[in-house]
Amino acid sequence: MLTGKRACEADVEEDGVVIEEVSKKARAEEYVISSTSGALAEGYNHGPLMDYEVANGKNSMEIDEDLHSRQLAVYGRETMRRLFASSVLVSGLQGLGAEIAKNLVLAGVKSITLHDEGKVELWDLSSNFYLSEDDVGKNRAMACVQKLQELNNAVIISTITVALSKEQLSDFQAVVFTDISLEKAIEFDDYCHNHQPPIAFIKSEIRGLFGSVFCDFGPMFTVVDVNGEEPHTGIIASISNDCPALVSCVDDERLEFQDGDLVIFSEVQGMIELNDGKPRKVVNARPYSFALEEDTTGFGTYNRGGIVTQVKQPKVLQFKPLRDALRDPGDFLLSDFSKIDRSPLLHLAFEALDAFRHEFGHFPAPGSEEDAQKLTNFAVSINERKSNCKLEEIDRKLLYHFASGSRAVLNPMAAMFGGIVGQEVMKACSGKFHPLFQFFYFDSVESLLPEPLDPNDLKPLNSRYDAQISVFGAKLQKKLEEANAFIIGSGALGCEFLKNLALMGVSCSPKGKLTITDDDVIEKSNLSRQFLFRDWNIGQAKSTVAAAAATAINPSFHIEALQNRASPETENVFDDTFWGSLDVVINALDNVTARMYIDGRCLYFQKPLLESGTLGTKCNTQMVVPHLTENYGASRDPPEKQAPMCTVHSFPHNIDHCLTWARSEFEGILDKTPNEVNKFLANPSEYLAAMKAAGDAQARDLLERVVDCLDTDRCDTFQECVTWARLRFEDYFSNRVKQLTFTFPEDAVTSSSTPFWSAPKRFPRPLQFSTSDASEVSLIMAASILRAETFGIPIPEWAKNPKKLADAIDKVVVPDFEPKKGVNIVTDEKATSLSTASIDDTAVINELVAKLDECLKRLPRGFHMNPVQFEKDDDTNFHMDLIAGLANMRARNYSIPEVDKLKAKFIAGRIIPAIATSTAMATGLVCLELYKVLAGGHKLEDYRNTFANLALPLFSMAEPVPPKVIKHQDMSWTVWDRWIIEGNITLHELLQWLKDKGLNAYSVSCGASLLYNSMFPRHKDRMDKKVVEIAQDVAKLELPSYRRHLDVVVACEDDDDNDIDIPLISIYFP
């Protein structure tokens, strides 16, 4: 997808259109089309794309799966192809337009045209991250082109710098306007609405802490996939011959069907009439059953088996044009139910602002009561003329805040709305996900300072932060600049946060500092959403590159980039002094373990934590504020349900089970076993002695694997690797299945006389290998090559030639297999191991040890194995070829639908679906909360936690939950409290200190060590010892030099023997 550097550069002028080729240092080619006259050549944005494709010799529909893997997990190939064929106009390149364009470039639309007639002002630097002070006076669109192009050279980016005509809109599938008069918007929308085919029209504005979106995708817009979720399925247990028919499913998982859903049936035995592929309607849906709106009395009798699958139906939406929707807006999309009456007022406020600007030619001045009153008068007048949706009361205070900050485009608002609008554009171009229908209004007026602002504090200072100052004042700006912040993680969220903070001016003075840490390096798959990185950064440290890119956005950014994982092992780096100096902590993490650790640190040091996360189109934010809210760890999601081990290994019934098994086999054969062999070879006598001492089934299994590698299955040539792979195929997909069906034949019954092979079990069939089956040969190829890698065997050229490889496979002699009686196959779903203990373990281990002693003598000097660690994001390494091949052969055994390598990669690689739009929205929401945290003085009801799903779209905002309060006598405390004792006290003094509070301590611990328990008589001997000395003696605690305190956890009861949870106790000593 990235192209090479051109041999020559030139400016060519044709029909008043300048095609300006921008050179970059040893980087990819770009096309920048900039208008120099009002008469643009018809089709101007299509020609360069054709040139680009011809020059690069590639089809524009090709999808770079390495680059877009996380995005593909959200959209799928068909949606991505539609995006790649779409041309979009973004008009207005202040902060909101820049955010939208950035998200669309990352998504990979065919082309984007940037329109802006205005020139860059210092004011714009508060929100547009692609502008610098050197750009002041230049055209805004032209100033953004080169940096936007760097994000994705496959997207053709052009500019228009003069007034648009409505006829020009016909070149686009979607048009977005971020700064347009209502009169002009109505004219353009009428044209788009009536055009054939309709052109999706989106109007969005950011006015201080207020924002709006309007969508019109035409009179008949088809939504192909309303929510993007996989169709729900169920495994059938029984179907009645009734009218309506009752369908019961196994209680493996709850059904997600709803009344009115359409479903199809497959693999039903007995009642085969249902396998006709005809969609049938669900009625009376229950957790594990539903009724069919169908008479099955004349159908065959249900025998067994069957899958029921939801059929997703397209949805047609009839959008109103803007002129009609203004008069009759219908239902507004809500985000905050505490502001349920806010949207109609904001609908009126944005109309009033347009009237104000039309009348006076400027925005209301910040802090001006006079201008706010003029805007309010317009609102009252417009409201009086309305026949529908007329408001009975107008909140004049809210309109004052709206008017006062209306000129400002704040970065957090732009980031949030850039995510929302960017997603709406992609819906318009693809039909994927439900569009916003049709108005959305939002405000974060609670982000304003709790106390009224002095109008003088809102005056511009001729700085890049003037827009932000016009809303929050210079005093808060100073606080932001002097803040000490800590960001953990520099991936997609981290990049967005750095950009936001740089624009907001956080830690942008010598008194402030931002520390960011991430121990990861940049990979190609990061580039589709981690927008501070470029292709030439691959392999470099994320935090270092991101910090440098953020400093380019704002040279005053005072930032330190580290490559340390924030964990107990790095508390010498992130020590007490470091944590004590912080004003705020921002998580940009992708795993719960790390989040829990940071949450614990913030609790301990009483620091605010701003938490967020994304999953595809979904995002959530959580504010953790000392003493005001509960902490992150106070509530946990339930653990993911995992399939029982016996299901994965012997009774899979879906492709996930097959892929889980395949990855387990990959890691066992290619990583764990070679590592175990190397462990043995490093010190044979010590290793064998340890195995003998263990003498259990696990030790036996490990020794058997090592013996197999060094003796039975050892490979010295590539042909031997082919032989090994072919025999493995036979073992996995033929012999094991024959043994399983011999042990449990198709008519087997359980002890309760029910069929053994009843749902969800699927009866398997052995495979017959054939070199004429390309998928089977491909599996042997991947397995042979990776096996050769572990033994350090050179890969011959013919290894990757299917025909020559097939000849090598034909040379393999495959022995006949006879199933054995008495073979134990685990069927217990609660079993945690497939190994079975035996009274002969010791004897078997001794035999294996003797074999290994003999193997050592035959091994060449210096022999070792090369473990292969699974890497999903390299399509040339054969890792996913092997895993997908293993999984699909297993699926073939059990008549489970197979998947392609990309889908296998999503599941086996445990890829988290991710897109730039939801990331941008999440960080914008968090940064609106950051204003509150750094300002201080806000109440609980001012803060917001959010869950959003851009696919639906759904926005749900609510106040955070306060911390649980524990009361005892006249005291109360929460999880945020920590009791501090000054002095090097004894254990007796500690217990007495608690006794004086009416608390009877019966246990004292430090870390994982028990320092005192009242049940142990010998612990009474410790009463006169210093608590610190006991910890050093019993817990072997080594306090670092920078720490002069000890933390202990004490379990207490009151006088009535009721357990009382008390805060952590810190004992400070000299």
Image (spheres, rainbow, N blue to C red):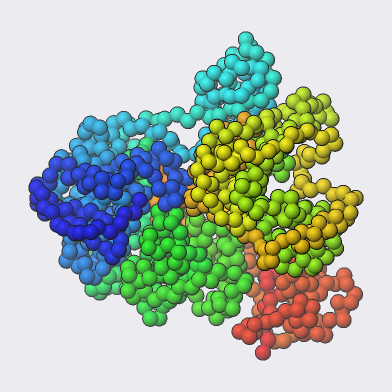
Above or below, 291 relative to 1012: above
Q: Is residue 525 visible?
A: yes
Q: Residue at x 25, y 52 (%)?
A: 157
Question: Could you tell me how many numbered marks the image carries?
Answer: 0
Q: Is residue 638 visible?
A: no
Question: In screen coordinates, is 876 left or right of 965?
Answer: left
Above or below, 421 relative to 943: above
Q: Position of residue 1032 (x, y in %)?
A: 75, 81
Question: In screen coordinates, is 231 left or right of 1032?
Answer: left
Above or below, 751 relative to 533: above
Q: Residue at x 41, y 74 (%)?
A: 559
Q: Residue at x 67, y 60 (%)?
A: 675
Nearest the viewer among 4 and 1044 is 4
Q: Position of residue 121 (x, y in %)?
A: 21, 66
Q: Quadrant of the C terminus?
A: bottom right
Q: Position of residue 716 (x, y in %)?
A: 65, 54
Question: In screen coordinates, is 1060 left or right of 320?
Answer: right
Nearest the viewer among 688 and 622 is 688
Q: Residue at x 39, y 39 (%)?
A: 79
Q: Quadrant of residue 250?
A: top right
Q: Position of residue 825 (x, y in %)?
A: 79, 39
Q: Quadrant of residue 30?
A: bottom left
Q: Quadrant of residue 322?
A: top left
Above or below, 487 relative to 334: below
Nearest the viewer among 1001 and 396 is 1001
